[in-house]
Amino acid sequence: MPDASGDRSKYFPAIEKKHGGPISLWIERLQDLGDAKYPDQIAFLRENHGFSQTHANALVMHVRGSLTSKRFATPDEFLKTLDPAVKKTAQSIFSAITKKYPDLELVIAWNQPMLRLGSGYVFGLSVAKNHISLSPFSSDVLLSFARQLKEYEVKKNTFQVPLNWKVDVSLLQSMAKARIAEME
């Protein structure tokens, strides 16, 4: 299993043991596929060489130079990676909710910061290049706030706000209240 650094090479000894040959052989075979897309590379290893999805993914992503498996142990670790202005927005979002609901715990789940109550999730966010996606973990809550969310892009389970969003404290607290009520 990769460690918190995102280093997929931790899988290499198991790959060599199960499939034989040095890891360089498997890297060469993937490189021989040229500009093959991720699904084609995975299929090549799985269908032609009996790789599991986990081993195929580790090798393909290593060859592609991806570090996206890096895991954050704490919300602070996650926040440290953000641009200072985006970090301030994210902290303001969580602060707006926890000010009214101090029993909520800020945790990392799915490698993103989330507010949790017991074993249920109340609110979370994900940072993209041009926006922050906010999730109340309920499509019903989103639907009930459709009128207040009309100025935002709303997806099935999230709504998007600008990276420098002036936090709407009332909206966030109301959505958290609705989600908590739904969980009870």
Image: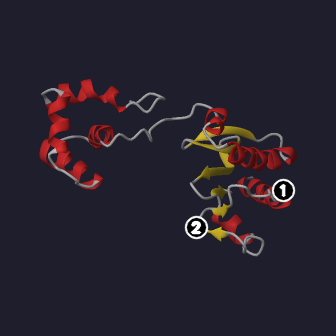
How would you rate the neighbour count of disc 1 (Cα within 10 Å): few for under 14, some for 14-19, many for 20 or more? some
Label 1 sits on a secondary structure element that is: helix
Going 73% across and 58% down the picture, which residue do you hit? 182
| Coloring applied to the structure | secondary structure
Considering only vertical position in the picture, is 129 above or below 17?
A: below
Going 77% across and 60% down the picture, which residue do you hit? 175
Nearest to the eye among marks 1 and 2: give it: 1
At label 2, the amino acid type is Lys
Q: Who is closer to the viewer here, 63 or 41?
A: 63
Going 65% across and 39% down the picture, which residue do you hit? 79
Q: Position of residue 22 (x, y in %)?
A: 16, 26
Q: Who is closer to the viewer here, 162 or 178?
A: 162
In the rendered image, the quadrant that contains the N terminus is top left
Q: Label for residue 119?
A: none
Going from the N terminus, do you reach mark 1 or mark 2 first? Answer: 2
Q: Which residue is mark 1?
A: 169
Q: Position of residue 117 (x, y in %)?
A: 72, 43
At label 1, the amino acid type is Val
Label 2 sits on a secondary structure element that is: loop
Horizontal side, residue 115 vs residue 13: left or right: right
Estimate the spatial distance between the alpha carbons at disc 1 and disc 2, rounded to whole Å: 22 Å
Q: Which residue is mark 2?
A: 156
